[in-house]
Image (cartoon, helix red, strand yellow):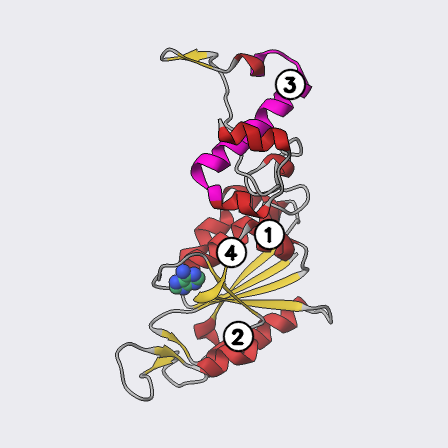
Amino acid sequence: MIIKVLTLFPEVLEPYFKSSMIGRAQSKNAVEIEIINIRDFSLDKHNSVDDYPFGGGGGMIMTPQPIINAHQAAEKKCNSDEKIRTIYCTPKGKTLTQQIAKELSEEKHIIILCGHYEGVDQRAIDTVTTDEISIGDYVLTGGELPAAVIVDSVVRLLPDVLDSKRRYEEESFYNGLLEYPQYTRPREYLGQKVPNILLSGDHSKISKWRHFQSLKETWLKRPDLLNAISMTEEEKEFIKK
Ligand code: ADE
């Protein structure tokens, strides 16, 4: 997968993309990530990238030219006739979910546009964007943190990026439920014991216990998620208790 991120603040994203899991994914060639500085594409003699809004109002608006040219350069670098999805990070977008991250992880080419200042000229958005994504109902100062969130949620789903023993099927949201509680050593800490069943070695019992714990977590913390799944009679009885 190739990901290009268009931003005015590469220094915000660079350390994150170099570190830990995202860095490892790149060294394993699971993904190639490039940060493109929109300012490098400004044809203005002062390299400016923003201007006052027509119609008045405060703040500065990112101008269309540097964005559209940076986007063209990113598309060319993808060097492909295959589909390219261009995501604009905005609170107006569809809220990012595990399902959207999964879909994006199946793409070959993704370009992410980070807005800044008070906004982006609508013509730039209309020209380059295929998808608008929000990371939640609040407003951030720019699209860099959302871009990092999108990249992280997508890259960890690529083959060979996480520990091969890690099973996505057991993570929160995979089957519409939250993940069951996990424990490691020691068996007892500050008087709190690891549930006996996890020490039993009986994998079918452990699996069933985990499933019902997932149901319980979801019922207690995100009951709204249960509306989207169908439950067996046994499961319905369990959450009523
Ligand atoms: N840019 C500013 N706020 C944002 C949000 N909540 N999601 C995505 N992009 C944004």
Q: Label 4 CB, ligand 1: below 8 Å? A: yes
Could one spot residue 10 in this view of the protein?
no
Q: Residues within 10 Å of mark 4 (few under 14, many from 20)?
A: some
Tell me which image quadrant ligand 1 sits in: bottom left
SS for callout 4: loop
What number is the disc on residue 96?
Answer: 4
Q: CA–CA distance between discs 3 and 4?
A: 34 Å
Residue corresponding to mark 2? 70
N-term mark: 2 or 3: 2
Give left or right: position of 219 versus 116: right
Q: Most extreme residue toward the left, as rendered?
A: 58
**Which marked residue is nearer to the observer: mark 4 or mark 2?**
4
N-term mark: 3 or 4: 4
Q: CA–CA distance between discs 1 and 4?
A: 8 Å
What number is the disc on residue 99?
Answer: 1
**Depth order, front residue of 99/226:** 226
Which span of residues is magenta-colored? 198-223
Residue corresponding to mark 3? 205
SS for callout 3: helix
x, y percent for residue 106: 68, 55
SS for callout 2: helix
* Three-letter residue code for mark 1: Gln
Q: Residues within 10 Å of mark 3 (few under 14, many from 20)?
A: few
Residue displayed at 48% across by 66% down: 93
SS for callout 1: helix
Given contact means CB atoms under 8 Å apart, are the residues at marks 1 and 4 in contact? no
* Three-letter residue code for mark 2: Ala
* Three-letter residue code for mark 4: Leu
Q: CA–CA distance between discs 1 and 2?
A: 29 Å
